[in-house]
Image (spheres, coloured by chain):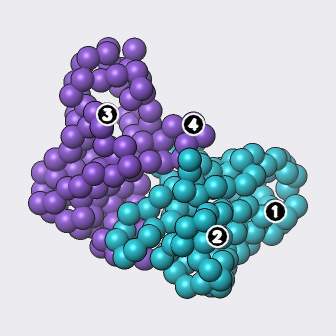
Chain colours: A purple, B cyan
Amino acid sequence: NAGVTQTPKFQVLKTGQSMTLQCAQDMNHNSMYWYRQDPGMGLRLIYYSASEGTTDKGEVPNGYNVSRLNKREFSLRLESAAPSQTSVYFCASSERSQNNYGYTFGSGTRLTVV
Amino acid sequence: TQLLEQSPQFLSIQEGENLTVYCNSSSVFSSLQWYRQEPGEGPVLLVTVVTGGEVKKLKRLTFQFGDARKDSSLHITAAQPGDTGLYLCAGARGNFNKFYFGSGTKLNVKP
């Protein structure tokens, strides 16, 4: 049972570089999410996709873009990385977009921007 | 400012003790979830509560949703070292499955 798979697990970028974080789920879930986790801040929602073909902004979308490539895959792109984007990024999915469905999280991508 | 405040931030106790973790807000939530996260891993869902006053039990863990749906608590009875981790609460407003997370309570249970 793979669940939610994120790649890469670790990444170091220089300021101004770009990269795409990949996320794939094999549970046939409709909704997918990108969160970032910073010390003392909990998890903050960056972007989400309620269903295939739709995406929407969360709490902290600036500096990021997303693509819902198909039902399984939801990628997060940093166009010009900044040190403030140093964080742990988590992808999650849920069966439905109604609020009594829990999230299944991936194991995270640890990103450092120098 | 966090929509959900968790307390305490850190808790270090001996095996066998009981503890309670709190999750508070001035906002009303349509549902609330609790997760546990271990180092280097993503959060894992423990429970979802949706009705004001609801109580759910998961072995030695008891979860309660406040009557006004603004707060929640997690009580652990006879804590064990395996309970060590970061406990996160997350609340959703409205019907859509978009959750706001608290900053977490880091629990350490010493043998």
Q: Which residue is mark 3?
A: A8
> In the rendering, which numbered label is found on residue B19?
1
- Whether residue B12 is situated above or below residue B44 in the rendered picture: above
Q: CA distance from mark 2 to mark 4?
A: 23 Å
Residue A102 locus on image (x, y percent) = 43, 68
| Residue B107 visible (yes or no) | no
Q: Amino acid at mark 4?
A: Pro
Are discs 3 and 1 located on one and the same chain? Answer: no
Residue drawn 38% across the image and 36% down it:
A109
Disc 1 packing (10 Å; few <14; some 14–19; many ≥20): some
Q: Examine the image and state in which quarter residue A48 appears.
A: bottom left
Q: In whole angstroms, how far apart are the C-alphas of marks 3 and 4?
A: 21 Å
- Label 4 belongs to which residue? A39
Q: Amino acid at mark 1?
A: Leu
For discs 3 and 4, the disc positioned in front in the rendered view: 4
Give me the C-alpha separation between circle 4 and circle 1. Answer: 23 Å
- Packing grade of label 4 (10 A; few <14, some 14-19, many >=20) is few
Q: Tell which of A110 and B68 is nearer to you.
A: B68
As measured in the structure, the alpha-carbon distance from the residue carrying label 2 to the one carrying label 1 is 17 Å
Residue A97 percent across, percent down from the top left: 30, 71
- What is the C-alpha distance between the residues marked 3 and 1? 37 Å
